Image (tube, helix red, strand yellow):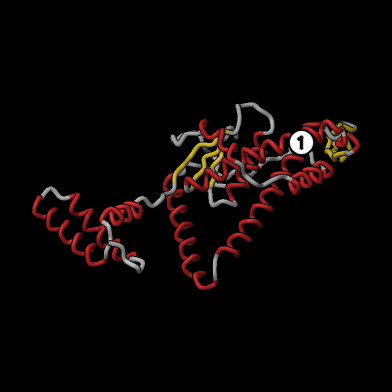
Protein backbone atom coordinates (compact mmCIF):
# COMPACT_ATOMS: atom_id res chain seq x y z
CA UNK A 1 0.00 0.00 0.00
CA UNK A 2 1.12 3.55 -0.65
CA UNK A 3 0.11 6.51 1.41
CA UNK A 4 -0.89 9.69 -0.44
CA UNK A 5 0.84 11.74 2.24
CA UNK A 6 4.60 11.82 2.93
CA UNK A 7 5.68 9.69 5.87
CA UNK A 8 6.96 11.69 8.86
CA UNK A 9 10.66 11.10 9.47
CA UNK A 10 10.04 10.37 13.14
CA UNK A 11 7.79 7.43 12.16
CA UNK A 12 10.47 5.99 9.89
CA UNK A 13 12.95 6.39 12.73
CA UNK A 14 10.67 4.61 15.22
CA UNK A 15 10.04 1.69 12.89
CA UNK A 16 13.69 1.48 11.89
CA UNK A 17 14.69 1.46 15.55
CA UNK A 18 12.35 -1.46 16.29
CA UNK A 19 13.77 -3.36 13.33
CA UNK A 20 17.30 -2.74 14.55
CA UNK A 21 16.38 -4.03 18.03
CA UNK A 22 14.79 -7.12 16.46
CA UNK A 23 17.93 -7.82 14.45
CA UNK A 24 20.38 -7.22 17.29
CA UNK A 25 18.85 -9.36 20.05
CA UNK A 26 19.69 -13.05 20.59
CA UNK A 27 16.33 -13.71 22.25
CA UNK A 28 13.89 -15.13 19.72
CA UNK A 29 10.83 -13.97 21.66
CA UNK A 30 12.16 -10.42 21.94
CA UNK A 31 13.06 -10.37 18.26
CA UNK A 32 9.56 -11.51 17.34
CA UNK A 33 7.97 -8.90 19.60
CA UNK A 34 10.08 -6.06 18.16
CA UNK A 35 9.40 -7.21 14.60
CA UNK A 36 5.67 -7.46 15.27
CA UNK A 37 5.63 -3.97 16.77
CA UNK A 38 7.50 -2.62 13.76
CA UNK A 39 5.10 -4.35 11.38
CA UNK A 40 2.05 -2.93 13.18
CA UNK A 41 3.40 0.61 12.98
CA UNK A 42 4.39 0.10 9.37
CA UNK A 43 0.96 -1.23 8.40
CA UNK A 44 -0.85 1.67 10.08
CA UNK A 45 1.41 4.16 8.35
CA UNK A 46 1.61 2.29 5.03
CA UNK A 47 5.39 2.09 5.24
CA UNK A 48 7.41 -0.67 3.64
CA UNK A 49 9.75 -2.28 6.18
CA UNK A 50 12.57 -2.16 3.64
CA UNK A 51 12.18 1.62 3.39
CA UNK A 52 12.27 1.97 7.19
CA UNK A 53 15.34 -0.26 7.46
CA UNK A 54 17.15 1.76 4.79
CA UNK A 55 16.21 5.00 6.53
CA UNK A 56 17.70 4.04 9.89
CA UNK A 57 20.80 2.60 8.21
CA UNK A 58 21.29 5.88 6.38
CA UNK A 59 21.02 7.87 9.60
CA UNK A 60 23.62 5.66 11.27
CA UNK A 61 26.08 6.16 8.41
CA UNK A 62 26.64 9.76 9.38
CA UNK A 63 30.02 10.92 8.05
CA UNK A 64 32.83 11.55 10.52
CA UNK A 65 36.14 13.41 10.12
CA UNK A 66 39.19 11.54 8.88
CA UNK A 67 42.88 12.18 8.41
CA UNK A 68 44.41 11.78 4.96
CA UNK A 69 48.04 12.17 3.86
CA UNK A 70 48.48 14.35 0.78
CA UNK A 71 51.80 13.81 -1.07
CA UNK A 72 53.35 17.11 -2.18
CA UNK A 73 56.69 16.12 -3.68
CA UNK A 74 60.01 14.37 -3.28
CA UNK A 75 62.49 15.54 -0.60
CA UNK A 76 64.84 18.23 -1.88
CA UNK A 77 62.58 19.40 -4.68
CA UNK A 78 62.52 23.18 -4.95
CA UNK A 79 59.26 25.04 -4.48
CA UNK A 80 57.55 22.51 -2.20
CA UNK A 81 56.65 25.23 0.29
CA UNK A 82 54.68 27.14 -2.33
CA UNK A 83 52.94 23.89 -3.31
CA UNK A 84 52.00 23.43 0.34
CA UNK A 85 50.83 27.03 0.50
CA UNK A 86 48.50 26.37 -2.43
CA UNK A 87 47.01 23.23 -0.86
CA UNK A 88 46.57 24.93 2.52
CA UNK A 89 44.81 27.88 0.86
CA UNK A 90 42.41 25.49 -0.84
CA UNK A 91 41.88 23.52 2.37
CA UNK A 92 41.12 26.64 4.40
CA UNK A 93 38.21 27.46 2.09
CA UNK A 94 36.84 23.91 2.29
CA UNK A 95 36.71 23.29 6.05
CA UNK A 96 39.85 21.15 6.09
CA UNK A 97 42.66 21.60 8.62
CA UNK A 98 46.27 20.85 7.78
CA UNK A 99 49.53 19.90 9.42
CA UNK A 100 52.68 20.12 7.32
CA UNK A 101 55.65 17.76 7.40
CA UNK A 102 58.98 19.33 8.34
CA UNK A 103 60.29 18.67 4.83
CA UNK A 104 57.12 20.05 3.15
CA UNK A 105 56.90 16.74 1.27
CA UNK A 106 53.39 15.98 2.51
CA UNK A 107 50.39 17.52 4.20
CA UNK A 108 48.21 15.86 6.83
CA UNK A 109 44.63 16.86 6.01
CA UNK A 110 41.90 16.62 8.65
CA UNK A 111 38.28 16.88 7.58
CA UNK A 112 35.27 15.10 6.15
CA UNK A 113 36.11 12.85 3.21
CA UNK A 114 34.01 14.78 0.70
CA UNK A 115 35.70 18.05 1.69
CA UNK A 116 39.17 16.51 1.35
CA UNK A 117 38.16 15.07 -2.04
CA UNK A 118 37.23 18.57 -3.16
CA UNK A 119 40.61 19.89 -1.99
CA UNK A 120 42.45 17.16 -3.89
CA UNK A 121 40.57 17.86 -7.10
CA UNK A 122 41.13 21.61 -6.91
CA UNK A 123 44.79 21.19 -5.97
CA UNK A 124 45.44 18.79 -8.85
CA UNK A 125 44.09 21.36 -11.32
CA UNK A 126 45.47 24.53 -9.75
CA UNK A 127 48.97 23.13 -9.18
CA UNK A 128 49.29 22.42 -12.91
CA UNK A 129 48.07 25.93 -13.69
CA UNK A 130 50.45 27.52 -11.16
CA UNK A 131 53.53 25.65 -12.40
CA UNK A 132 52.67 26.27 -16.04
CA UNK A 133 52.09 29.99 -15.47
CA UNK A 134 55.32 30.42 -13.48
CA UNK A 135 57.28 28.54 -16.16
CA UNK A 136 55.90 30.86 -18.83
CA UNK A 137 56.79 33.89 -16.73
CA UNK A 138 60.37 32.74 -16.23
CA UNK A 139 60.80 31.80 -19.90
CA UNK A 140 59.51 35.21 -20.96
CA UNK A 141 62.48 36.82 -19.20
CA UNK A 142 60.30 39.60 -17.79
CA UNK A 143 61.80 39.14 -14.34
CA UNK A 144 65.28 40.15 -15.57
CA UNK A 145 64.31 43.81 -15.85
CA UNK A 146 63.49 43.97 -12.14
CA UNK A 147 65.83 44.29 -9.18
CA UNK A 148 65.65 43.10 -5.62
CA UNK A 149 67.01 44.78 -2.53
CA UNK A 150 69.63 42.81 -0.65
CA UNK A 151 71.67 43.46 2.44
CA UNK A 152 75.38 42.89 1.99
CA UNK A 153 78.06 42.94 4.66
CA UNK A 154 81.43 44.49 3.87
CA UNK A 155 84.61 45.06 5.83
CA UNK A 156 85.77 48.64 6.06
CA UNK A 157 88.78 49.60 8.15
CA UNK A 158 88.44 46.39 10.13
CA UNK A 159 84.74 46.87 10.80
CA UNK A 160 81.75 45.06 9.34
CA UNK A 161 79.36 47.40 7.59
CA UNK A 162 75.96 46.42 6.31
CA UNK A 163 74.40 48.23 3.39
CA UNK A 164 71.42 47.82 1.08
CA UNK A 165 72.08 47.24 -2.61
CA UNK A 166 69.89 46.61 -5.65
CA UNK A 167 70.67 43.33 -7.39
CA UNK A 168 69.15 41.56 -10.40
CA UNK A 169 66.35 39.16 -9.53
CA UNK A 170 67.42 35.53 -9.78
CA UNK A 171 65.14 33.10 -11.58
CA UNK A 172 64.50 31.04 -8.44
CA UNK A 173 63.53 34.19 -6.52
CA UNK A 174 61.14 35.26 -9.25
CA UNK A 175 59.56 31.81 -9.40
CA UNK A 176 59.04 31.60 -5.63
CA UNK A 177 57.52 35.08 -5.46
CA UNK A 178 55.29 34.35 -8.45
CA UNK A 179 53.95 31.13 -6.93
CA UNK A 180 53.50 32.65 -3.47
CA UNK A 181 51.34 35.41 -4.93
CA UNK A 182 49.44 32.90 -7.10
CA UNK A 183 48.58 30.71 -4.09
CA UNK A 184 47.59 33.73 -1.96
CA UNK A 185 45.23 34.98 -4.69
CA UNK A 186 43.66 31.53 -5.07
CA UNK A 187 43.00 31.46 -1.33
CA UNK A 188 41.25 34.84 -1.52
CA UNK A 189 39.15 33.79 -4.52
CA UNK A 190 38.05 30.53 -2.92
CA UNK A 191 37.14 32.26 0.33
CA UNK A 192 35.00 34.71 -1.62
CA UNK A 193 33.31 31.88 -3.53
CA UNK A 194 32.59 30.04 -0.29
CA UNK A 195 30.98 33.13 1.24
CA UNK A 196 28.84 33.70 -1.86
CA UNK A 197 27.66 30.08 -1.99
CA UNK A 198 26.77 30.01 1.70
CA UNK A 199 24.78 33.21 1.30
CA UNK A 200 22.88 31.79 -1.67
CA UNK A 201 22.05 28.32 -0.33
CA UNK A 202 20.85 29.32 3.14
CA UNK A 203 17.23 30.55 2.95
CA UNK A 204 16.19 32.95 5.69
CA UNK A 205 13.63 30.49 7.06
CA UNK A 206 16.29 27.84 7.70
CA UNK A 207 19.26 30.06 8.45
CA UNK A 208 19.29 29.24 12.16
CA UNK A 209 19.20 25.48 11.58
CA UNK A 210 21.86 25.63 8.90
CA UNK A 211 24.08 27.82 11.05
CA UNK A 212 23.74 25.32 13.89
CA UNK A 213 24.62 22.42 11.57
CA UNK A 214 27.71 24.27 10.33
CA UNK A 215 28.71 25.09 13.89
CA UNK A 216 28.31 21.44 14.94
CA UNK A 217 30.45 20.38 11.98
CA UNK A 218 33.15 22.84 13.01
CA UNK A 219 33.10 21.61 16.61
CA UNK A 220 33.31 17.97 15.51
CA UNK A 221 36.26 18.73 13.24
CA UNK A 222 38.01 20.75 15.95
CA UNK A 223 37.61 17.93 18.46
CA UNK A 224 38.90 15.39 15.94
CA UNK A 225 41.90 17.53 15.03
CA UNK A 226 42.76 18.21 18.67
CA UNK A 227 42.65 14.51 19.57
CA UNK A 228 44.43 13.27 16.42
CA UNK A 229 47.09 15.81 15.45
CA UNK A 230 50.62 15.25 16.74
CA UNK A 231 51.99 18.48 15.29
CA UNK A 232 54.46 20.56 17.25
CA UNK A 233 54.69 24.21 16.31
CA UNK A 234 53.02 26.20 13.57
CA UNK A 235 53.67 26.17 9.85
CA UNK A 236 54.57 29.72 8.82
CA UNK A 237 54.33 29.38 5.08
CA UNK A 238 56.99 29.82 2.39
CA UNK A 239 59.68 32.43 2.73
CA UNK A 240 61.44 33.96 -0.26
CA UNK A 241 64.79 33.91 1.52
CA UNK A 242 66.57 34.99 -1.63
CA UNK A 243 64.64 38.26 -1.69
CA UNK A 244 61.39 39.95 -2.55
CA UNK A 245 60.34 40.64 -6.14
CA UNK A 246 57.34 42.95 -6.44
CA UNK A 247 57.17 42.41 -10.20
CA UNK A 248 57.04 38.63 -9.87
CA UNK A 249 54.37 38.91 -7.20
CA UNK A 250 52.24 41.14 -9.38
CA UNK A 251 52.57 38.64 -12.22
CA UNK A 252 51.69 35.73 -9.92
CA UNK A 253 48.68 37.61 -8.57
CA UNK A 254 47.42 38.26 -12.11
CA UNK A 255 47.81 34.56 -12.95
CA UNK A 256 45.95 33.61 -9.77
CA UNK A 257 43.08 35.89 -10.76
CA UNK A 258 42.90 34.23 -14.19
CA UNK A 259 43.20 30.63 -12.98
CA UNK A 260 40.26 28.29 -13.55
CA UNK A 261 38.64 27.17 -10.31
CA UNK A 262 36.21 24.68 -11.83
CA UNK A 263 36.72 20.94 -11.41
CA UNK A 264 36.45 18.14 -13.96
CA UNK A 265 36.07 14.34 -13.55
CA UNK A 266 39.65 13.77 -14.62
CA UNK A 267 40.98 15.76 -11.67
CA UNK A 268 40.49 12.80 -9.37
CA UNK A 269 43.02 10.67 -11.23
CA UNK A 270 45.78 11.20 -8.66
CA UNK A 271 43.71 10.07 -5.70
CA UNK A 272 44.99 6.52 -5.93
CA UNK A 273 48.32 7.69 -4.52
CA UNK A 274 46.76 8.84 -1.29
CA UNK A 275 46.53 6.95 1.97
CA UNK A 276 44.69 7.39 5.24
CA UNK A 277 47.46 5.82 7.27
CA UNK A 278 48.70 7.99 10.11
CA UNK A 279 52.31 9.09 10.00
CA UNK A 280 54.51 10.31 12.84
CA UNK A 281 56.63 12.61 10.66
CA UNK A 282 54.75 15.89 11.11
CA UNK A 283 56.07 18.57 13.39
CA UNK A 284 54.29 21.61 12.02
CA UNK A 285 51.00 22.89 13.30
CA UNK A 286 47.65 23.60 11.81
CA UNK A 287 47.53 25.92 8.86
Judged from this view, the residue extending furthest toward the left is 29
Along the line of sight, the residue nearer the viewer: 168 or 2? 2
Up the image or down, 262 lies above or below 19; here it is: above
Q: Looking at the image, which residue is at 58% across and 61% down?
A: 198
Point out residue 273 in the picture as x, y percentages from the top left corner. 52, 30
Q: Is 135 situated left or right of 71 in this image?
A: right
222 shown above or below 153: below
Residue 117 higher or lower than 223, as above or below: above
The residue closer to the viewer here, 52 or 162, is 52
Residue situated furthest bottom in the rendering: 205
Report the number of discs: 1
Looking at the image, which residue is at 14% across and 53% down?
A: 31
Q: Is residue 267 in view from this perspective?
A: yes
Q: Quadrant of residue 140?
A: top right
Q: Residue at x 60, y 59 (%)?
A: 197
Residue sitting nearer the eye, 69 or 274: 274
Residue 111 placement (x, y as % from top left): 49, 48
Q: Is residue 160 visible?
A: no
Q: Position of residue 262 (x, y in %)?
A: 65, 46
Considering every residue shown, the one lying at the far front of the view is 1
- The residue that label 1 is drawn on is 134
Secondary structure type for disc 1? helix
Relative to residue 41, is residue 113 drawn left or right? right
Amino acid sequence: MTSPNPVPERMLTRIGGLLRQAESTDNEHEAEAFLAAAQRLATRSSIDLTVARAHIAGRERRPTPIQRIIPIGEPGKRGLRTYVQLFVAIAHANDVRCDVARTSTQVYAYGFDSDIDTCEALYASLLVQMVRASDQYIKSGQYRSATVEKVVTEKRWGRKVRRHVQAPVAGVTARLNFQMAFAARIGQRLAAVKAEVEAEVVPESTAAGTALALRNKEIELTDFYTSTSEARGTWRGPQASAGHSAAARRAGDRAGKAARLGTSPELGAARGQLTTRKSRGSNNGSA
